Image (cartoon, grey):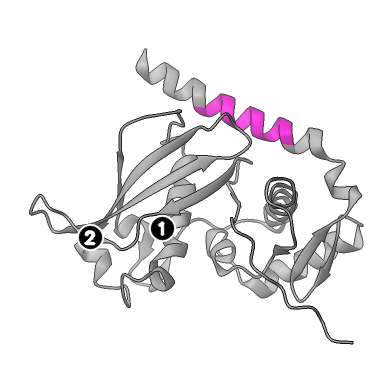
Amino acid sequence: MSTPTRTPTAKTIYVTRTGLPLSFKFEWPFRHATSGADFDVLHTAITLENSEGLRVLVAVNLSATLREVLPSLEPKDTEAPVINALRQEVDHKQMEFVKSGKLVPLPFSSRHYNFKLKQWVFGKASDEEIARMIERKVYWQTRLVGGDVRLSDPTEALYVDTTTDHIAEIAAGLAQQGLFTMARRYATALPGLMEKKDRFESEMAAARQQLEEKHAFERG
């Protein structure tokens, strides 16, 4: 019996380390800055899912130095690091989600890239943190979008400085706990995971409150 073909979902949910479910919409391609400055710009909308339509509009400013190490400015070479740079800024409480707002500039520069090692740098995660990320990923993708959840996304591996193989190994352990089933590195959520709704909701609420309090304090 052949395995059914998996079709990608219309929207992918990416969860921050603090537990906020996000989705991204890009206005490709990168465009050279009209101000005459030597950088390229990509406009992006980040939506805080499971909220009242809260989002932040970002102008991702790619520095000339970082542009030199990229094979191209096409999505296949830039989307994953851009998503992770934006997620990292949310983790660092640099983004404020509102119902409407002005475009926020984000320097996408050498601080996200190790030139000596020639690799992206977003922070190493422990196996425990990776397991928590997988649980949140499967829960929020299932709840907000539906369908099977891809666990072999290189973007996720890059975010926690590991490999898709290692993520699959950790996911297999979670599957043995009855949280989801796995086939070809796609997860199908089971009641054992979806019944943890209160936990995932409270984690999101706490992260959102900390983010809002930080920006409220800065506004005075």
Q: Secondary structure at mark 1?
A: helix
Q: What range is drawn magenta here? A: 201-211
Q: Is residue 51 above or below residue 85?
A: above
Q: Position of residue 182 (x, y in %)?
A: 82, 68
Identity of the residue drawn at 59% across and 56% down: 12
- Label 1 sits on residue: 82
Q: Is residue 84 magenta?
A: no
Q: Classify residue 191 as left or right of residue 31.
A: right
Identity of the residue drawn at 78% across and 35% down: 199
Q: Amino acid at mark 1?
A: Val
Give the mark nearer the N terminus: 2 vs 1.
2
Crowdedness near tag 2: few (<14), some (14–19) or many (≥20) residues, C-alpha within 10 Å: some
Q: Of residues 171 and 118, which is closer to you in this image?
A: 171
Identity of the residue drawn at 46% across and 56% down: 83
Q: Are marks 2 and 1 in contact (CB under 8 Å)?
A: no
State which mark lies toward you, 2 or 1: 2
**Quadrant where the C terminus is found in the figure:** top left
Q: Amino acid at mark 2?
A: Arg
How far apart marks 2 and 1 lie (CA) works out to: 15 Å
- Label 2 sits on residue: 31
The answer to which quarter of the image holds residue 48 is top right
Q: Position of residue 39 (x, y in %)?
A: 19, 58
**Quadrant where the N terminus is found in the figure:** bottom right
Q: Secondary structure at mark 2?
A: strand
Identity of the residue drawn at 57% across and 59% down: 160
What residue occupies the far bottom of the structure in this picture? 1
Name the disc covering residue 134, or none. none
Q: Is residue 211 above or below residue 4?
A: above
Q: Position of residue 133 (x, y in %)?
A: 68, 52
The answer to which quarter of the image holds residue 127 is bottom right
